Amino acid sequence: MTEEVRRQIQEIKRSFRLVMDGATAASMREKGANYRLNWGATIPRLREMANEIGPNYDLAIELWKENVRECKILATMIMPPKQMLSEVVDLWMEQTETLEIAEQAAFNLYQHLDYAADKAFLWLSSENDLTQICGYHILSRLFMRKCEPTERDINEFVDQALVALQSPNLALRKAALQSVMHFADLGLVYERISKSALRSINMEL
C-alpha cells in the first residue's frame, strides 16, 4: 500500500464518523448482518463519497481488505470494471459474507464487467448461496439491458433457476425469480420458456 492510499483510507474512515447512523447499524445487526465495524452509512451517502473519490483501482483493492461494511461497499463503487481481473472477482466473491455486500457488488460492479455473463452463469452452479445470488442479480441486470443469452446458456439458466426456486433460502429464491422475470421480458420466446419451466414446479410467472 502506498503512503497516498494509506492516507486516503484514513480520511475515508474518519469521514464515516460524520455519517454514522447507530439506528441503521443496530437494525442490520438484528437482521443478522454482522460486520466487524458498521457505521450504518446509507447507500446514497456512500455513492456521493464514491463520486467525489472517482474510479481508483489501488484504493478499491485496499478498501476491500478492511473488514468494515462501508469500506467494502465503497470499494465496489470505485473499482474500475475494465481493470478488475477475473481472479480478483473470484477472491472478492469468496470473501463476501453478507447478502448486502453480495447485492451491492453485483449492482455496483460485477454487472459492468466485460465477462459479467460468463462469471454469472458459472456462479449459478456454486454450492454457496451468496455466490448464486450474485449470479442471478448480475443476470437480472443484463437481461434488463436486453442482453440475450446463447442457447446453451438458456438451458443452463433454466435448469439452475428451477433448483434455486426450490431452495430453502428465501433470498436465493427471490433473486432467481427476479432473474426469471427479467429473462421472460426479453421477448415472447423467452416468456414461453419461462412459463413452461415454472409450470414444471407448480409456479406461475
Image: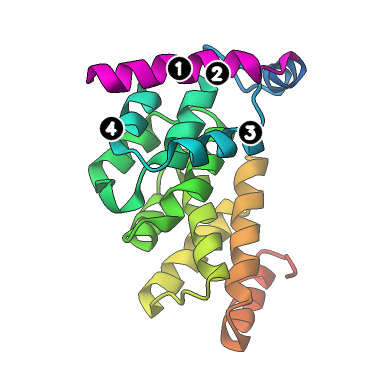
Residue, disc 2: 15
Residue, disc 3: 45
Determine contact: label 1, label 4, CB under 8 Å: no
Determine contact: label 3, label 1, CB under 8 Å: no
Dot 3, crowdedness within 10 Å: few (<14), some or many (≥20)?
A: few
Residue, disc 1: 11
3D distance between C-alphas at marks 1 and 4: 15 Å
Mark whose residue sits in front, 1 or 4: 1
In the image, which disc is placed on residue 58? 4
Determine contact: label 2, label 1, CB under 8 Å: yes
Dot 1, crowdedness within 10 Å: few (<14), some or many (≥20)?
A: few
Disc 4, SS: helix
Determine contact: label 3, label 4, CB under 8 Å: no
User: Residue at point 75% right, 69% down?
Assistant: 204
Amino acid type, callout 4: Asp
Disc 2, SS: helix
Amino acid type, callout 2: Ser
Stretch in magenta: 1-22
3D distance between C-alphas at marks 4 and 2: 19 Å
User: Residue at point 53% right, 25% down?
Assistant: 70
**Residue 21, horizontal then vertical, whole percent:** 71, 18
User: Residue at point 62% right, 75% down?
Assistant: 184
Disc 1, SS: helix
Amino acid type, callout 3: Arg
Q: Is residue 21 magenta?
A: yes
Amino acid type, callout 1: Glu
Locate residue 58 relative to residue 180 in the image: left or right: left
Q: Which residue extends farthest bottom?
A: 188
